[in-house]
Image: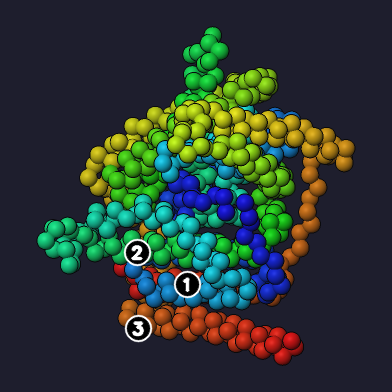
Amino acid sequence: MKEFYTPGKSPVHEIDARVKLTFTLAFIIFLSLTPSGAWPAYILFLTLALSIALLSRVSIGLIQKRALLALPFALATLPLIFTGPPPRVDLPFFQTLGIAYSPEGLVRFVSITLKSWISLQAALLLSATTHISDLLTTFQQLRIPKLFVAIIGLMWRYLFLISDEVTRMLRARSSRSAIVPGSRGGGNVFWRAKVTGGMAGSIFLRSIERSDRVYSAMLSRGYTGVLPASESQPIAKNDRGYLILGLFLLMLLWALGLLTGG
Amino acid sequence: MLFSPAHPMHIPDGFLSVPVSVIAWIISVVVIGIALKKSSGELKERDLPLIGVLAAAIFAGQMLNFSVTGGTSGHLLGAAIATILLGPWPAVLVMTSVVSVQALIFQDGGVLALGANLFNMAVIGVFVAHAVYTLITGFLKKQSWGVFVAGFVAAWSSILIASLACALQLALSGTSPANISVPAMGAIHALIGVGEGLITVGALAFIFATRKDLLKLGDAKPANNKGVLIVGSLIALVLAVLSPLASSHPDGLEWVAEEHGFIEAAKDAFYNIIPDYTMPGISNPALATIIAGIIGSVIVFGVAYGIGRAEKRAKNKGSAQS
Protein backbone atom coordinates (compact mmCIF):
# COMPACT_ATOMS: atom_id res chain seq x y z
CA MET A 1 0.00 0.00 0.00
CA LYS A 2 1.44 3.31 -1.03
CA GLU A 3 0.07 6.80 -0.62
CA PHE A 4 0.31 9.06 -3.62
CA TYR A 5 1.73 12.07 -1.77
CA THR A 6 4.90 13.30 -3.47
CA PRO A 7 6.87 15.69 -1.31
CA GLY A 8 8.08 18.81 -3.07
CA LYS A 9 8.45 22.54 -2.87
CA SER A 10 6.48 23.57 -5.93
CA PRO A 11 4.06 26.53 -5.82
CA VAL A 12 1.18 24.05 -5.83
CA HIS A 13 2.50 22.28 -2.73
CA GLU A 14 2.68 25.59 -0.86
CA ILE A 15 -0.87 26.76 -1.49
CA ASP A 16 -3.18 26.54 1.53
CA ALA A 17 -4.77 23.08 1.72
CA ARG A 18 -8.23 24.66 2.14
CA VAL A 19 -7.81 26.43 -1.19
CA LYS A 20 -6.68 23.25 -2.92
CA LEU A 21 -9.53 21.19 -1.49
CA THR A 22 -12.16 23.78 -2.44
CA PHE A 23 -10.72 24.21 -5.92
CA THR A 24 -10.55 20.46 -6.55
CA LEU A 25 -14.14 20.01 -5.41
CA ALA A 26 -15.29 22.93 -7.57
CA PHE A 27 -13.32 21.55 -10.54
CA ILE A 28 -15.05 18.17 -10.26
CA ILE A 29 -18.50 19.69 -9.67
CA PHE A 30 -18.28 22.08 -12.62
CA LEU A 31 -16.95 19.32 -14.84
CA SER A 32 -19.83 17.06 -13.78
CA LEU A 33 -22.31 19.86 -14.54
CA THR A 34 -20.90 20.29 -18.04
CA PRO A 35 -23.30 18.61 -20.48
CA SER A 36 -22.20 15.68 -22.63
CA GLY A 37 -20.58 16.38 -25.97
CA ALA A 38 -19.03 19.70 -24.91
CA TRP A 39 -15.65 18.73 -26.38
CA PRO A 40 -14.01 22.21 -26.36
CA ALA A 41 -14.80 22.59 -22.66
CA TYR A 42 -13.37 19.12 -21.89
CA ILE A 43 -10.14 20.00 -23.67
CA LEU A 44 -9.83 23.20 -21.63
CA PHE A 45 -10.57 21.37 -18.35
CA LEU A 46 -7.91 18.79 -19.23
CA THR A 47 -5.41 21.50 -20.20
CA LEU A 48 -6.00 23.21 -16.87
CA ALA A 49 -5.43 19.97 -14.93
CA LEU A 50 -2.29 19.16 -16.91
CA SER A 51 -0.91 22.70 -16.45
CA ILE A 52 -1.31 22.45 -12.69
CA ALA A 53 0.30 19.00 -12.78
CA LEU A 54 3.26 20.47 -14.67
CA LEU A 55 3.54 23.30 -12.17
CA SER A 56 3.46 20.86 -9.25
CA ARG A 57 6.32 18.79 -10.77
CA VAL A 58 4.45 15.59 -10.01
CA SER A 59 5.25 13.04 -12.71
CA ILE A 60 2.48 13.27 -15.29
CA GLY A 61 3.17 9.72 -16.38
CA LEU A 62 2.54 8.51 -12.85
CA ILE A 63 -0.73 10.45 -12.70
CA GLN A 64 -1.87 8.97 -16.00
CA LYS A 65 -1.01 5.49 -14.81
CA ARG A 66 -3.05 5.92 -11.65
CA ALA A 67 -5.88 7.60 -13.58
CA LEU A 68 -6.33 4.44 -15.65
CA LEU A 69 -7.40 2.52 -12.53
CA ALA A 70 -10.97 3.80 -12.67
CA LEU A 71 -11.33 2.89 -16.32
CA PRO A 72 -12.91 -0.55 -15.76
CA PHE A 73 -15.90 1.26 -14.31
CA ALA A 74 -16.61 2.61 -17.80
CA LEU A 75 -18.02 -0.86 -18.51
CA ALA A 76 -21.10 0.22 -16.57
CA THR A 77 -21.92 2.89 -19.14
CA LEU A 78 -20.94 0.87 -22.20
CA PRO A 79 -24.53 -0.35 -22.76
CA LEU A 80 -25.54 3.28 -23.37
CA ILE A 81 -24.09 3.00 -26.86
CA PHE A 82 -26.79 0.51 -27.76
CA THR A 83 -29.62 1.49 -25.43
CA GLY A 84 -29.24 5.26 -25.66
CA PRO A 85 -32.06 7.48 -26.87
CA PRO A 86 -33.30 7.02 -30.45
CA PRO A 87 -32.69 7.51 -33.36
CA ARG A 88 -30.74 4.29 -33.75
CA VAL A 89 -28.32 3.90 -36.63
CA ASP A 90 -26.81 0.74 -38.11
CA LEU A 91 -23.17 0.25 -37.19
CA PRO A 92 -20.97 1.48 -40.04
CA PHE A 93 -18.72 -1.18 -41.64
CA PHE A 94 -20.81 -3.95 -40.05
CA GLN A 95 -24.12 -3.22 -41.73
CA THR A 96 -24.67 -6.86 -42.52
CA LEU A 97 -24.81 -7.70 -38.83
CA GLY A 98 -27.77 -5.41 -38.38
CA ILE A 99 -26.65 -4.05 -35.02
CA ALA A 100 -28.11 -0.62 -34.36
CA TYR A 101 -26.42 1.89 -32.09
CA SER A 102 -27.52 5.24 -30.75
CA PRO A 103 -25.22 8.13 -31.73
CA GLU A 104 -26.41 10.16 -28.76
CA GLY A 105 -25.70 7.21 -26.48
CA LEU A 106 -22.19 6.98 -27.92
CA VAL A 107 -21.58 10.69 -27.26
CA ARG A 108 -22.77 10.22 -23.69
CA PHE A 109 -20.55 7.19 -23.16
CA VAL A 110 -17.44 8.99 -24.41
CA SER A 111 -18.31 12.12 -22.40
CA ILE A 112 -18.79 10.20 -19.15
CA THR A 113 -15.53 8.31 -19.59
CA LEU A 114 -13.62 11.52 -20.40
CA LYS A 115 -15.14 13.42 -17.48
CA SER A 116 -14.31 10.60 -15.10
CA TRP A 117 -10.73 10.46 -16.36
CA ILE A 118 -10.21 14.24 -16.02
CA SER A 119 -11.86 14.36 -12.56
CA LEU A 120 -9.58 11.58 -11.38
CA GLN A 121 -6.52 13.57 -12.45
CA ALA A 122 -7.74 16.55 -10.42
CA ALA A 123 -8.26 14.35 -7.34
CA LEU A 124 -4.84 12.73 -7.84
CA LEU A 125 -3.22 16.17 -7.99
CA LEU A 126 -4.81 17.12 -4.69
CA SER A 127 -3.49 14.07 -2.88
CA ALA A 128 -0.12 14.24 -4.62
CA THR A 129 0.53 17.77 -3.36
CA THR A 130 -1.27 17.77 0.00
CA HIS A 131 -0.06 15.82 2.99
CA ILE A 132 -2.71 14.04 5.05
CA SER A 133 -1.85 16.07 8.15
CA ASP A 134 -2.65 19.30 6.24
CA LEU A 135 -5.84 17.70 4.99
CA LEU A 136 -6.84 16.78 8.55
CA THR A 137 -6.22 20.34 9.73
CA THR A 138 -8.29 21.53 6.81
CA PHE A 139 -11.16 19.27 7.83
CA GLN A 140 -11.06 20.78 11.29
CA GLN A 141 -10.97 24.31 9.92
CA LEU A 142 -13.94 23.51 7.71
CA ARG A 143 -15.93 22.65 10.85
CA ILE A 144 -16.04 18.91 10.23
CA PRO A 145 -16.73 17.40 13.70
CA LYS A 146 -13.57 17.00 15.77
CA LEU A 147 -14.46 13.45 16.74
CA PHE A 148 -14.55 12.37 13.11
CA VAL A 149 -11.27 14.10 12.27
CA ALA A 150 -9.70 12.41 15.29
CA ILE A 151 -10.94 8.99 14.12
CA ILE A 152 -9.44 9.51 10.66
CA GLY A 153 -6.19 10.74 12.21
CA LEU A 154 -5.94 7.66 14.41
CA MET A 155 -6.84 5.41 11.53
CA TRP A 156 -4.11 6.92 9.38
CA ARG A 157 -1.57 6.48 12.15
CA TYR A 158 -2.21 2.75 12.43
CA LEU A 159 -3.10 1.99 8.81
CA PHE A 160 0.43 1.27 7.60
CA LEU A 161 1.32 -0.65 10.73
CA ILE A 162 -1.67 -2.95 10.33
CA SER A 163 -1.32 -3.24 6.57
CA ASP A 164 2.29 -4.36 7.11
CA GLU A 165 0.89 -6.97 9.47
CA VAL A 166 -1.56 -8.10 6.79
CA THR A 167 1.23 -8.23 4.21
CA ARG A 168 3.33 -10.40 6.51
CA MET A 169 0.37 -12.71 7.05
CA LEU A 170 -0.24 -13.00 3.30
CA ARG A 171 3.45 -13.77 2.80
CA ALA A 172 3.33 -16.41 5.53
CA ARG A 173 0.30 -17.98 3.88
CA SER A 174 1.85 -18.12 0.44
CA SER A 175 5.12 -19.49 1.81
CA ARG A 176 3.16 -22.36 3.35
CA SER A 177 1.09 -22.92 0.23
CA ALA A 178 3.57 -24.40 -2.21
CA ILE A 179 1.88 -26.59 -4.79
CA VAL A 180 3.62 -29.68 -6.07
CA PRO A 181 3.16 -29.82 -9.87
CA GLY A 182 0.58 -32.39 -10.81
CA SER A 183 -1.20 -32.52 -7.49
CA ARG A 184 -3.82 -30.23 -6.01
CA GLY A 185 -2.65 -28.03 -3.19
CA GLY A 186 -4.65 -27.10 -0.13
CA GLY A 187 -8.32 -27.74 0.47
CA ASN A 188 -11.42 -26.59 -1.36
CA VAL A 189 -12.86 -23.10 -1.62
CA PHE A 190 -14.45 -23.30 1.82
CA TRP A 191 -11.19 -24.33 3.41
CA ARG A 192 -9.40 -21.43 1.71
CA ALA A 193 -12.14 -19.03 2.82
CA LYS A 194 -11.83 -20.33 6.38
CA VAL A 195 -8.08 -19.73 6.39
CA THR A 196 -8.58 -16.19 5.08
CA GLY A 197 -11.35 -15.61 7.58
CA GLY A 198 -9.05 -16.73 10.37
CA MET A 199 -6.47 -14.22 9.17
CA ALA A 200 -9.11 -11.45 9.15
CA GLY A 201 -10.32 -12.49 12.59
CA SER A 202 -6.85 -12.40 14.08
CA ILE A 203 -6.19 -8.99 12.52
CA PHE A 204 -9.37 -7.62 14.07
CA LEU A 205 -8.59 -9.22 17.41
CA ARG A 206 -5.06 -7.85 17.47
CA SER A 207 -6.41 -4.42 16.50
CA ILE A 208 -9.00 -4.41 19.25
CA GLU A 209 -6.31 -5.36 21.74
CA ARG A 210 -3.99 -2.76 20.26
CA SER A 211 -6.69 -0.12 20.71
CA ASP A 212 -6.72 -0.98 24.44
CA ARG A 213 -3.03 -0.17 24.63
CA VAL A 214 -3.51 2.97 22.54
CA TYR A 215 -6.21 4.06 24.95
CA SER A 216 -3.97 3.53 27.99
CA ALA A 217 -1.23 5.47 26.25
CA MET A 218 -3.65 8.31 25.51
CA LEU A 219 -4.87 8.32 29.12
CA SER A 220 -1.33 8.48 30.44
CA ARG A 221 -0.75 11.55 28.28
CA GLY A 222 -3.73 13.37 29.72
CA TYR A 223 -6.59 12.38 27.43
CA THR A 224 -9.93 13.24 29.03
CA GLY A 225 -12.26 12.36 26.19
CA VAL A 226 -11.82 15.83 24.69
CA LEU A 227 -9.28 16.51 21.99
CA PRO A 228 -7.22 19.69 21.87
CA ALA A 229 -8.45 22.15 19.26
CA SER A 230 -6.15 23.11 16.43
CA GLU A 231 -5.48 26.78 15.89
CA SER A 232 -7.06 28.28 12.82
CA GLN A 233 -5.18 30.70 10.63
CA PRO A 234 -6.84 32.88 8.02
CA ILE A 235 -6.12 32.00 4.40
CA ALA A 236 -3.26 34.10 3.00
CA LYS A 237 -4.28 36.97 0.71
CA ASN A 238 -2.45 35.49 -2.28
CA ASP A 239 -4.08 32.10 -1.87
CA ARG A 240 -7.50 33.69 -1.59
CA GLY A 241 -6.80 35.51 -4.85
CA TYR A 242 -5.83 32.24 -6.56
CA LEU A 243 -9.03 30.63 -5.32
CA ILE A 244 -11.29 33.40 -6.61
CA LEU A 245 -9.49 33.47 -9.95
CA GLY A 246 -9.66 29.68 -10.20
CA LEU A 247 -13.37 29.53 -9.38
CA PHE A 248 -14.08 32.26 -11.94
CA LEU A 249 -12.19 30.32 -14.60
CA LEU A 250 -14.05 27.11 -13.78
CA MET A 251 -17.37 28.94 -14.07
CA LEU A 252 -16.33 30.29 -17.44
CA LEU A 253 -15.34 26.84 -18.69
CA TRP A 254 -18.64 25.48 -17.46
CA ALA A 255 -20.54 28.25 -19.27
CA LEU A 256 -18.63 27.38 -22.42
CA GLY A 257 -19.61 23.75 -21.89
CA LEU A 258 -23.27 24.71 -21.60
CA LEU A 259 -23.06 26.69 -24.83
CA THR A 260 -21.24 24.06 -26.88
CA GLY A 261 -22.62 20.84 -25.38
CA GLY A 262 -25.65 18.93 -26.56
CA MET B 1 -0.61 -0.90 -5.30
CA LEU B 2 -2.36 -3.72 -3.56
CA PHE B 3 -5.81 -2.35 -4.13
CA SER B 4 -6.04 -2.96 -7.84
CA PRO B 5 -8.37 -3.88 -9.34
CA ALA B 6 -10.64 -1.25 -7.82
CA HIS B 7 -13.60 -2.70 -6.01
CA PRO B 8 -16.58 -2.53 -8.35
CA MET B 9 -18.64 -0.74 -5.71
CA HIS B 10 -16.54 2.43 -5.47
CA ILE B 11 -18.14 4.78 -8.00
CA PRO B 12 -15.61 7.17 -9.60
CA ASP B 13 -16.42 10.81 -10.36
CA GLY B 14 -18.26 11.54 -13.59
CA PHE B 15 -20.61 8.58 -13.39
CA LEU B 16 -23.25 10.19 -11.21
CA SER B 17 -25.31 13.23 -12.10
CA VAL B 18 -24.93 16.20 -9.78
CA PRO B 19 -28.52 15.99 -8.36
CA VAL B 20 -28.04 12.31 -7.45
CA SER B 21 -24.64 13.04 -5.88
CA VAL B 22 -26.01 15.97 -3.88
CA ILE B 23 -29.00 14.01 -2.54
CA ALA B 24 -26.75 11.10 -1.54
CA TRP B 25 -24.36 13.53 0.19
CA ILE B 26 -27.20 15.06 2.20
CA ILE B 27 -28.54 11.69 3.38
CA SER B 28 -25.07 10.39 4.26
CA VAL B 29 -24.10 13.54 6.15
CA VAL B 30 -27.31 13.39 8.21
CA VAL B 31 -26.80 9.71 9.11
CA ILE B 32 -23.10 10.20 9.92
CA GLY B 33 -24.05 13.21 12.03
CA ILE B 34 -26.43 11.05 14.03
CA ALA B 35 -23.73 8.38 14.38
CA LEU B 36 -21.26 10.98 15.68
CA LYS B 37 -23.77 12.33 18.15
CA LYS B 38 -24.55 8.84 19.45
CA SER B 39 -20.87 8.03 19.71
CA SER B 40 -19.86 11.18 21.56
CA GLY B 41 -22.91 11.06 23.81
CA GLU B 42 -23.65 7.60 25.03
CA LEU B 43 -20.55 5.67 24.12
CA LYS B 44 -17.52 5.81 26.34
CA GLU B 45 -14.43 7.87 25.58
CA ARG B 46 -12.63 4.57 25.17
CA ASP B 47 -14.38 4.09 21.85
CA LEU B 48 -12.39 6.72 19.98
CA PRO B 49 -9.20 4.61 19.78
CA LEU B 50 -11.27 1.46 19.22
CA ILE B 51 -13.10 2.94 16.23
CA GLY B 52 -9.94 4.50 14.78
CA VAL B 53 -7.78 1.39 15.04
CA LEU B 54 -10.54 -0.92 13.84
CA ALA B 55 -11.09 1.34 10.83
CA ALA B 56 -7.41 0.88 10.00
CA ALA B 57 -7.84 -2.88 10.45
CA ILE B 58 -10.86 -3.01 8.11
CA PHE B 59 -8.99 -0.93 5.53
CA ALA B 60 -5.93 -3.18 5.73
CA GLY B 61 -8.15 -6.27 5.94
CA GLN B 62 -9.52 -5.46 2.51
CA MET B 63 -6.19 -6.67 1.15
CA LEU B 64 -7.01 -10.19 2.34
CA ASN B 65 -8.22 -12.41 -0.44
CA PHE B 66 -8.51 -16.04 -1.41
CA SER B 67 -8.69 -17.56 -4.86
CA VAL B 68 -12.07 -18.97 -5.84
CA THR B 69 -11.52 -20.38 -9.31
CA GLY B 70 -9.37 -19.26 -12.18
CA GLY B 71 -8.53 -15.60 -11.82
CA THR B 72 -11.40 -14.63 -9.54
CA SER B 73 -10.90 -14.12 -5.84
CA GLY B 74 -12.95 -13.44 -2.75
CA HIS B 75 -12.45 -10.16 -0.90
CA LEU B 76 -13.54 -8.54 2.30
CA LEU B 77 -15.37 -5.20 2.40
CA GLY B 78 -15.97 -5.39 6.13
CA ALA B 79 -19.25 -3.55 6.77
CA ALA B 80 -20.85 -6.66 8.28
CA ILE B 81 -17.96 -7.69 10.53
CA ALA B 82 -17.61 -4.09 11.78
CA THR B 83 -21.34 -4.01 12.57
CA ILE B 84 -21.22 -7.35 14.39
CA LEU B 85 -18.17 -6.36 16.46
CA LEU B 86 -19.11 -2.77 17.31
CA GLY B 87 -22.84 -2.28 16.78
CA PRO B 88 -24.36 -0.17 14.01
CA TRP B 89 -23.47 3.42 14.94
CA PRO B 90 -19.76 2.96 15.55
CA ALA B 91 -19.69 0.76 12.44
CA VAL B 92 -21.09 3.65 10.40
CA LEU B 93 -18.15 5.75 11.62
CA VAL B 94 -15.64 2.99 10.87
CA MET B 95 -16.91 2.51 7.32
CA THR B 96 -17.17 6.28 6.78
CA SER B 97 -13.50 6.69 7.70
CA VAL B 98 -12.46 3.80 5.48
CA VAL B 99 -14.44 4.94 2.43
CA SER B 100 -13.49 8.63 2.85
CA VAL B 101 -9.76 7.92 3.09
CA GLN B 102 -9.99 5.58 0.11
CA ALA B 103 -11.56 8.37 -1.93
CA LEU B 104 -9.44 11.30 -0.73
CA ILE B 105 -6.03 9.65 -0.50
CA PHE B 106 -6.14 6.56 -2.70
CA GLN B 107 -8.66 7.69 -5.34
CA ASP B 108 -10.65 4.52 -4.90
CA GLY B 109 -14.02 6.13 -5.65
CA GLY B 110 -14.68 9.75 -6.59
CA VAL B 111 -14.72 12.89 -4.47
CA LEU B 112 -18.10 14.20 -5.58
CA ALA B 113 -19.32 10.60 -5.73
CA LEU B 114 -18.10 10.06 -2.15
CA GLY B 115 -21.56 10.93 -0.82
CA ALA B 116 -23.09 8.08 -2.82
CA ASN B 117 -20.28 5.68 -1.91
CA LEU B 118 -20.72 6.53 1.76
CA PHE B 119 -24.46 6.03 1.40
CA ASN B 120 -23.98 2.59 -0.19
CA MET B 121 -21.19 1.20 1.97
CA ALA B 122 -21.34 3.06 5.29
CA VAL B 123 -25.09 3.55 5.59
CA ILE B 124 -26.85 0.83 3.60
CA GLY B 125 -24.12 -1.78 4.13
CA VAL B 126 -24.14 -1.28 7.90
CA PHE B 127 -27.89 -0.84 8.38
CA VAL B 128 -28.78 -3.91 6.32
CA ALA B 129 -26.09 -5.99 8.02
CA HIS B 130 -27.39 -4.94 11.43
CA ALA B 131 -31.03 -5.66 10.57
CA VAL B 132 -30.30 -9.08 9.07
CA TYR B 133 -27.88 -10.08 11.84
CA THR B 134 -30.26 -9.05 14.62
CA LEU B 135 -33.27 -10.74 13.05
CA ILE B 136 -31.52 -14.06 12.36
CA THR B 137 -29.72 -14.27 15.72
CA GLY B 138 -33.14 -13.57 17.26
CA PHE B 139 -34.65 -16.54 15.43
CA LEU B 140 -31.74 -18.87 16.11
CA LYS B 141 -31.13 -17.83 19.71
CA LYS B 142 -30.77 -21.39 20.99
CA GLN B 143 -28.33 -22.71 18.40
CA SER B 144 -24.66 -21.98 18.86
CA TRP B 145 -24.24 -21.89 15.06
CA GLY B 146 -26.88 -19.18 14.78
CA VAL B 147 -24.18 -16.50 14.95
CA PHE B 148 -22.41 -17.95 11.92
CA VAL B 149 -25.53 -18.28 9.78
CA ALA B 150 -26.53 -14.76 10.74
CA GLY B 151 -23.01 -13.49 10.00
CA PHE B 152 -22.97 -15.09 6.56
CA VAL B 153 -26.40 -13.84 5.53
CA ALA B 154 -25.74 -10.37 6.97
CA ALA B 155 -22.46 -10.06 5.05
CA TRP B 156 -23.97 -11.40 1.83
CA SER B 157 -27.07 -9.21 1.92
CA SER B 158 -25.15 -6.06 2.90
CA ILE B 159 -23.03 -6.46 -0.25
CA LEU B 160 -25.97 -7.33 -2.50
CA ILE B 161 -28.28 -4.55 -1.32
CA ALA B 162 -25.48 -1.97 -1.44
CA SER B 163 -24.71 -2.98 -5.03
CA LEU B 164 -28.39 -2.66 -5.98
CA ALA B 165 -28.39 0.86 -4.51
CA CYS B 166 -25.27 1.60 -6.56
CA ALA B 167 -26.92 0.32 -9.75
CA LEU B 168 -30.03 2.39 -9.10
CA GLN B 169 -27.94 5.53 -8.58
CA LEU B 170 -26.21 4.92 -11.90
CA ALA B 171 -29.57 4.38 -13.58
CA LEU B 172 -31.05 7.53 -12.01
CA SER B 173 -28.07 9.49 -13.28
CA GLY B 174 -28.75 8.24 -16.80
CA THR B 175 -25.27 6.69 -16.92
CA SER B 176 -26.32 3.10 -17.20
CA PRO B 177 -29.67 1.67 -18.26
CA ALA B 178 -31.44 0.07 -15.29
CA ASN B 179 -32.44 -3.04 -17.22
CA ILE B 180 -28.74 -3.85 -17.66
CA SER B 181 -27.00 -2.32 -14.64
CA VAL B 182 -29.33 -3.75 -11.99
CA PRO B 183 -29.16 -7.41 -13.07
CA ALA B 184 -25.43 -7.12 -13.86
CA MET B 185 -24.46 -5.46 -10.58
CA GLY B 186 -26.82 -7.75 -8.68
CA ALA B 187 -25.45 -10.92 -10.23
CA ILE B 188 -21.79 -9.95 -9.78
CA HIS B 189 -22.32 -8.94 -6.18
CA ALA B 190 -24.42 -11.98 -5.34
CA LEU B 191 -21.15 -13.86 -6.05
CA ILE B 192 -18.82 -11.33 -4.41
CA GLY B 193 -21.16 -11.43 -1.41
CA VAL B 194 -20.51 -15.18 -1.00
CA GLY B 195 -16.78 -14.45 -0.65
CA GLU B 196 -17.53 -11.69 1.84
CA GLY B 197 -19.87 -14.00 3.76
CA LEU B 198 -17.33 -16.84 3.92
CA ILE B 199 -14.53 -14.58 5.16
CA THR B 200 -16.89 -13.00 7.70
CA VAL B 201 -17.87 -16.44 9.02
CA GLY B 202 -14.20 -17.45 9.18
CA ALA B 203 -13.39 -14.31 11.15
CA LEU B 204 -16.38 -14.85 13.44
CA ALA B 205 -15.32 -18.46 14.06
CA PHE B 206 -11.84 -17.29 15.00
CA ILE B 207 -13.14 -14.64 17.37
CA PHE B 208 -15.75 -17.05 18.75
CA ALA B 209 -13.00 -19.51 19.62
CA THR B 210 -10.63 -16.98 21.19
CA ARG B 211 -12.60 -14.03 22.56
CA LYS B 212 -16.25 -15.01 22.71
CA ASP B 213 -17.00 -11.99 24.90
CA LEU B 214 -16.33 -9.60 21.98
CA LEU B 215 -19.27 -10.92 19.99
CA LYS B 216 -21.61 -9.45 22.58
CA LEU B 217 -20.27 -5.94 22.06
CA GLY B 218 -22.69 -5.25 19.27
CA ASP B 219 -25.94 -6.03 21.02
CA ALA B 220 -25.08 -4.46 24.36
CA LYS B 221 -27.88 -1.94 23.97
CA PRO B 222 -30.27 -3.41 21.43
CA ALA B 223 -33.09 -1.07 22.44
CA ASN B 224 -31.16 1.97 21.24
CA ASN B 225 -30.71 0.49 17.80
CA LYS B 226 -34.33 -0.28 17.07
CA GLY B 227 -34.43 2.58 14.55
CA VAL B 228 -31.48 1.09 12.67
CA LEU B 229 -33.16 -2.31 12.71
CA ILE B 230 -36.37 -0.94 11.20
CA VAL B 231 -34.68 1.33 8.66
CA GLY B 232 -32.24 -1.42 7.68
CA SER B 233 -35.05 -3.91 7.09
CA LEU B 234 -37.00 -1.31 5.11
CA ILE B 235 -34.01 -0.46 2.91
CA ALA B 236 -33.41 -4.14 2.20
CA LEU B 237 -37.07 -4.76 1.39
CA VAL B 238 -37.56 -1.65 -0.76
CA LEU B 239 -34.38 -2.17 -2.77
CA ALA B 240 -35.02 -5.88 -3.22
CA VAL B 241 -38.49 -5.08 -4.61
CA LEU B 242 -37.71 -1.84 -6.42
CA SER B 243 -34.71 -3.09 -8.39
CA PRO B 244 -36.45 -5.86 -10.34
CA LEU B 245 -39.33 -3.41 -11.00
CA ALA B 246 -36.95 -0.78 -12.29
CA SER B 247 -35.09 -3.24 -14.49
CA SER B 248 -38.16 -4.94 -15.92
CA HIS B 249 -39.34 -1.72 -17.54
CA PRO B 250 -37.64 -1.25 -20.92
CA ASP B 251 -36.20 2.13 -20.05
CA GLY B 252 -36.07 1.43 -16.37
CA LEU B 253 -35.67 4.25 -13.94
CA GLU B 254 -34.95 6.89 -16.49
CA TRP B 255 -38.51 6.43 -17.63
CA VAL B 256 -39.79 6.84 -14.09
CA ALA B 257 -37.64 9.91 -13.66
CA GLU B 258 -38.79 11.45 -16.92
CA GLU B 259 -42.40 10.57 -16.26
CA HIS B 260 -42.35 12.49 -13.04
CA GLY B 261 -40.13 15.15 -14.48
CA PHE B 262 -37.98 15.47 -11.39
CA ILE B 263 -34.70 15.03 -13.23
CA GLU B 264 -35.73 17.79 -15.62
CA ALA B 265 -36.73 19.99 -12.72
CA ALA B 266 -33.39 19.45 -11.08
CA LYS B 267 -31.56 20.14 -14.32
CA ASP B 268 -33.53 23.30 -14.97
CA ALA B 269 -32.65 24.65 -11.57
CA PHE B 270 -28.96 24.25 -12.36
CA TYR B 271 -29.03 25.48 -15.94
CA ASN B 272 -31.23 28.48 -15.30
CA ILE B 273 -28.24 30.28 -13.89
CA ILE B 274 -27.42 31.12 -17.48
CA PRO B 275 -30.85 31.81 -18.95
CA ASP B 276 -31.54 30.43 -22.42
CA TYR B 277 -27.97 29.33 -22.86
CA THR B 278 -26.65 32.83 -23.40
CA MET B 279 -24.23 34.93 -21.46
CA PRO B 280 -25.96 37.62 -19.49
CA GLY B 281 -26.06 40.80 -21.51
CA ILE B 282 -25.41 39.16 -24.88
CA SER B 283 -28.53 38.14 -26.75
CA ASN B 284 -27.03 36.27 -29.70
CA PRO B 285 -26.28 32.66 -28.64
CA ALA B 286 -23.68 32.09 -31.36
CA LEU B 287 -21.84 35.25 -30.41
CA ALA B 288 -22.01 34.31 -26.73
CA THR B 289 -20.52 30.89 -27.49
CA ILE B 290 -17.68 32.41 -29.43
CA ILE B 291 -16.95 35.00 -26.76
CA ALA B 292 -17.04 32.48 -23.91
CA GLY B 293 -14.87 30.12 -25.94
CA ILE B 294 -12.30 32.79 -26.72
CA ILE B 295 -12.09 34.09 -23.14
CA GLY B 296 -11.86 30.56 -21.71
CA SER B 297 -9.23 29.41 -24.18
CA VAL B 298 -7.16 32.56 -23.76
CA ILE B 299 -7.10 32.21 -19.99
CA VAL B 300 -6.36 28.48 -19.99
CA PHE B 301 -3.63 28.76 -22.58
CA GLY B 302 -2.29 31.84 -20.79
CA VAL B 303 -1.98 29.73 -17.65
CA ALA B 304 -0.39 26.86 -19.57
CA TYR B 305 2.04 29.17 -21.40
CA GLY B 306 3.02 30.96 -18.21
CA ILE B 307 3.72 27.68 -16.48
CA GLY B 308 5.69 26.40 -19.46
CA ARG B 309 7.84 29.55 -19.47
CA ALA B 310 8.42 29.40 -15.73
CA GLU B 311 9.29 25.73 -16.01
CA LYS B 312 11.79 26.39 -18.82
CA ARG B 313 13.42 29.19 -16.88
CA ALA B 314 13.70 26.98 -13.81
CA LYS B 315 15.30 24.26 -15.90
CA ASN B 316 17.76 26.66 -17.54
CA LYS B 317 18.71 27.98 -14.13
CA GLY B 318 19.15 24.42 -12.88
CA SER B 319 21.41 23.46 -15.79
CA ALA B 320 23.38 26.69 -15.47
CA GLN B 321 24.09 25.96 -11.85
CA SER B 322 25.13 22.38 -12.41
Total count of labels: 3
Mark 2 → mark 3, Cα distance in angstroms: 27 Å
The amino acid marked with disc number 1 is: Phe
Q: Quadrant of residue B224?
A: top right
Is residue A230 something that shows in the picture? yes
Above or below, B158 against B253 in this view is above
Mark 1, Cα crowd under 10 Å, few <14 / some 14-19 / many 20+, is many
Mark 2 or 1 closer to N-term?
1
Q: Position of residue A199 (x, y in %)?
A: 61, 33
Pick the residue in front: B134 or B81: B81
Q: Residue furthest left?
A: A96
The amino acid marked with disc number 2 is: Val
Above or below, B224 against A76 in this view is above
Residue B287, which numbered label? 3
Pick the residue in front: A146 or B113: B113
The residue lying at 62 percent from left, 60 percent from top is A4
Q: Position of residue A116 (x, y in %)?
A: 44, 61
Residue A45, which numbered label? 1
